[in-house]
Image (tube, rainbow, N blue to C red):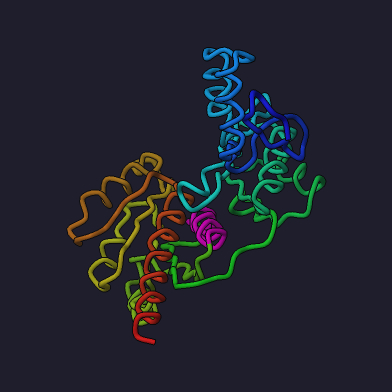
Amino acid sequence: MSSRGGIHIREHPLGGPVPVESALDVDKNALEVLLRSIQDGSLSAEEGVGSVLDAIGRAGQLDLGHTRLDTDRADRCGHAEVVYGEGKSPDELVEICGALLEAHGRFLATRVQPAGRAALSRAMEVQVDDRAATVTGGALPEATGDVAIISAGTSDAPVAREAATTARFLGAAVEQIPDVGVAGIHRILSVAPRIREANVIIVVAGMEGALPSVVGGLVDRPVIAVPTSVGYGASLGGVAALLGMLNSCASGITVVNIDNGFGAGFAAAQINRQIVRAAQNGRSRTS
């Protein structure tokens, strides 16, 4: 632990006086020492203020040189920072994911290219989903609640699996229900009783993006629609599905960006967590 004018900064285990978790560690005694130093003239007021502001400015972040990790995000938002792998070099990914694993005990990286997946697999023990282009490290939390992930076609699987990996990483129990698109409407009807049991439903579809409207008309659960870039020319890389979902006549459908399985999985896990907490609080009040 290093010290600046009575303000203590935790040493990061990877080296250097860089904060981990809530990095600013100021107790009553340290603050008193700082104030007395200013009072007796051994430290000027300007230097004392500078020490405090410098420590605060460095709190909650881990500076790797190429990346500043937000190590306080778990405290603020309930979940640690997730790595978007696209555009990052294999070496950068290894350093970033290693730092997150050290700080939080686990990590999730999405959109990781083959070279990055290979580098992470060599550097540490990880779970890789090549189809979803995701990599996770560390132990997963207990699976709670119920998130159902429905995909219209097998071609939508990479996005659906990214959503599933994300929701599971964030503590949700997940079930994937693939290939139930509207071209064979009996397929979605056959699983309607199952999806009505879920806390949250993610619906992944490309082409004209009709499936979320059908699901939205069958359930009383939150429905998160994910348009994919699957389709021929006039699908415009997922824009047709996106517009169809945004203009759905089924009430209460929330739509994320094209191919954004991560965003859907994250949102579903957050909703699921609140439902699980509410159920637990209800049981504790009646027990």
Q: Position of residue 268 (x, y in %)?
A: 41, 60
The secondary structure that most of the magenta stretch takes on is helix
Q: Residue at x 25, y 49 (%)?
A: 246
Q: Position of residue 100 (x, y in %)?
A: 66, 44
Write down the quadrant of residue 84 in the picture. top right
Q: Position of residue 129 (x, y in %)?
A: 65, 56
Q: Is residue 163 left or right of residue 103?
A: left
Q: Position of residue 40 (x, y in %)?
A: 60, 17
Q: Residue at x 23, y 60 (%)?
A: 252
Q: Is residue 204 left or right of residue 164?
A: left
Is 157 covered by the magenta stretch?
yes
Residue farthest to the front, as pictured: 40
Is 244 covered by the magenta stretch?
no
Q: Which residues are magenta?
A: 156-170
From what the image shows, is residue 45 above or below residue 32?
above
Q: Is residue 128 left or right of residue 173?
A: right
Toward the viewer: 129 or 187? 129
Toward the viewer: 203 or 88? 88
